Image (cartoon, rainbow, N blue to C red):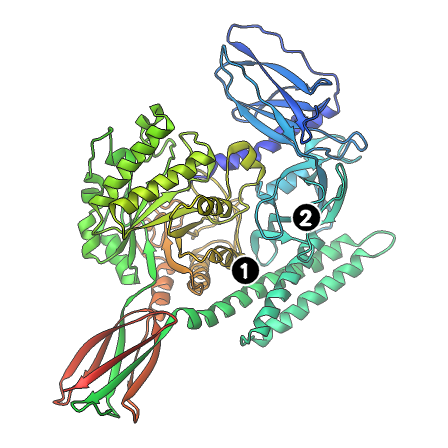
Amino acid sequence: MPRAVANARLLMLSVILIIVFTACSAEGNQSAPVLQRQDEVIVHGTVTNTDNKPVEKAEVYISDADYRPLSRTSTDRLGNYQVSLTAGNHYHLYTGVLSQLNKYNFAYVPQTRGITPKVGADNRTDFKLWPGATVVLYAYDNDGNLIRNKQFREITGANSYATSLNNLPKYNSFEAIHDAISNWQWDQAIPAFVVLPDNLYKFNINWEVPGFGKVILTIDNECRGYGCNEQSDKLDLNFNYEAAKSKLYALKADYAVLKETGYNIPQDITDNITRAQSCLQSAEVFLAKKPSPDMKSAVRELNQCLKVAFWTHEEVSIEQAKYDIERFRKGDARITVVDADGKPMPGCRIAYNQAGSDFLFGANPLGPDGSYNPVYADLMKSAGINYACVTCRWGMLQPVPGVFDWDNIDNFQKLDALMNDKFNLTGTLSLWTFRNQSVGYDFCPVYLDKRDFPQLQDFTYKYIYALAERYKDRIDTWEMNELNLPWANALNLTIDERIALAETFCRAVKDANPGARVLMNSSALPFEYNLSDYYIFDNVPTPYFIDMLKVHKVSFDIIGLEFYYSGVAGENAAPAGLDMALIDDLLNQYGQYNLPIYIEELSAPSKQLPGTAWWHSNWNEDTQAEFLVDFYTIAFSKPMTRAINWSWGVSDRESYMAYGGLIDSDFKPKKAYYALQQLIRSWKSQGTGLTNADGEFDFRGYGGDYVIEYLSTDGKTVKTSLHIYEQKETDIIINMK
């Protein structure tokens, strides 16, 4: 859901660093705070290190709510600073300390704090800085020219992340450093991560791979990671070379796993790995040239290595998925036909036809603005959709405390029609503490602002209990959404309070309907928001939040994941792009929790917009359809994945992602719609056969309900039913009496 706020924060450093680096070249140009008006107050604090020792001469830079630079100051020998600011306005305070040994290197990991000073209050903001070291990314364009800071950030769209070796966010700050050429000009600085010394990192950058796409590109030193030993150390990396080397290593590792486990590997995969390896070796020759590297030729070979490796890695993921679909999504059935005396009847013709799927294929919403529209619903049913969502807007359902109005669910969303259409239903966004200009107080009513936390828990329990109890015979899954993310925290709750609120939600649901399930939904990409945001904005990456819920014994049942990683989503946010191999890895990572997984929000565009990620080619209807088929194939192959929901927006008229609907603005199905229809049909089983000498007929089919037809002894067609469970055996006996 909305990410515009997050993007603004990611771009914050682009603005702040302008004043940081220009200030470094103009020392002594700061003014002491002087109170000039009654609404001006002193904001002060202390900058210390992790040993609680003061950090002297730490620069503190002040920007306004929109990150426009205002002023700066510095700490004294006791680590204290102060600045005069206007009360009532929101400000961002940033501090970063360069090394005394090398003025281009960072000595501490920079931090940012937000404050809204008030008259008569102690407007104190302290910083505790962790020791820092600098990893510099030297990236080169197709002509072999060094890409400097401004251009690098334009290419990546501020999507640059540092993680641990298992893809979890690790404390860092994405910055830039200077060299003799940049002359303290921010545009000409060199992109760099400031990391913790004596720690191993991998780096994930949204990058354009010619001939493949603009997607997350991971560098990890062949799974060994990168690190600096001491505070203020610096590590220089050739980004292009490290990217190609890391990607090829990841491809070869997954290829080796497939080979060892007996998968049938097409020969072209083996040949392409050899091609990519040859390109990397050629690049190494150009990089080793004396007296200076032939960077243009090296980049050409490295780009070719990346292109071949990305395409081949996706092919590996798809081939494995096809094999795993047969393993995990099917079960075995045996039908035994006997006569009136219980003797087997060979040669009986049996026909089986799958009538319903256990797997949930969803689309949401089924009408404009979250309503129910029979045109949408009929189209989706024709595509094979069997899952839908009922949006639960707290502010509408309980407009004032203690007073409920169920009209939005019962009549606007037409719950009875959804039931008649036989959709499996989830109560989505049942708890979502989010507000913005478009939704207002629909999900997070204004009367919650005046409550202390115990009162908020009480309000939440009573609302959720009433919701789950009223609809317990029709809706058995209820969603709490994005409790770990900062933009969905309109009530400014701490992370401990949000965990406690999740427990209240689960308890209310289970008390109202013991058979109901709770779905915890949030963003899929663990490193989408740097871990530095956790300390600043109380933001917790989704895997960490799942771990916290488990530690606190919060009884949720399903992991919900959002995949908005292409095009333009929400309020002009342009997220990083993902390739299928990374999507494969993410689903494997969440699968380790051994909980059902719902892909609760997923979309991809049918039109390319400027400056956005792309995959295989510019986005169009063909690319959207291809993406859908590959994504669904990989997700469907995972045994813990139980639902895939194309959401938010069935039609381009209301899709959260621009041009992300399955049907266009004129309600005409796109190619993606027909691709989904064909895919779902291919994942249903049907066939005929004859019983063997023992009166048995065996078949293997996808999980779900089946209609079985056979001829009785008097020649009449008789129907019966059976249910196939995935990875299990089902036996039935037909007695020909």
Q: Which residue is mark 2?
A: 200
Mark 2 closeness class: few <14, some 14–19, many ≥20 residues within 10 Å: some
Q: Is residue 92 rendered to the left or right of residue 107?
A: left
Quarter of the image where the C terminus is located:
bottom left
Q: Position of residue 620 (x, y in %)?
A: 45, 55
Label 1 environment density (alpha carbons within 10 Å; few <14, some 14–19, many ≥20): many
Which-is-in-front pick, marks 1 and 2?
2
Q: Which residue is mark 1?
A: 581
- Type of the residue with mark 1: Ala
* Location of residue 76 by image quarter: top right
Q: CA distance from mark 1 to mark 2?
A: 23 Å
The location of residue 349, given as percent across then percent down, is 24, 87
Residue 594, image quadrant? bottom left
Residue 225 in the image: above or below residue 462? below
Q: Is residue 328 left or right of residue 735?
A: right
Residue beneath the point at 24% across and 28% down: 400
Side of 490 relative to 143 (left or right): left
Residue lying at the far right of the rendered structure: 291
- Amino acid type of the residue tagged 2 in the rendering: Leu
- 642 lies above or below 431: below
Could you tell me residue 126's position as x and y percent?
60, 23
Q: Is residue 448 visible?
A: yes
Depth check, front residue: 723 or 17: 723
In terms of secondary structure, where does tag 1 sit? helix
Q: Secondary structure at mark 2?
A: loop
Q: Is residue 510 above or below residue 118?
A: below
Observer-nearest of 72 and 472: 472
> What is the quadrant of the N terminus in the image?
top left
Q: Measured from the top left, where is residue 326 in percent x and y? A: 42, 73
Q: How many marks?
A: 2
Asked if residue 112 lies left or right of residue 425, the reply is right
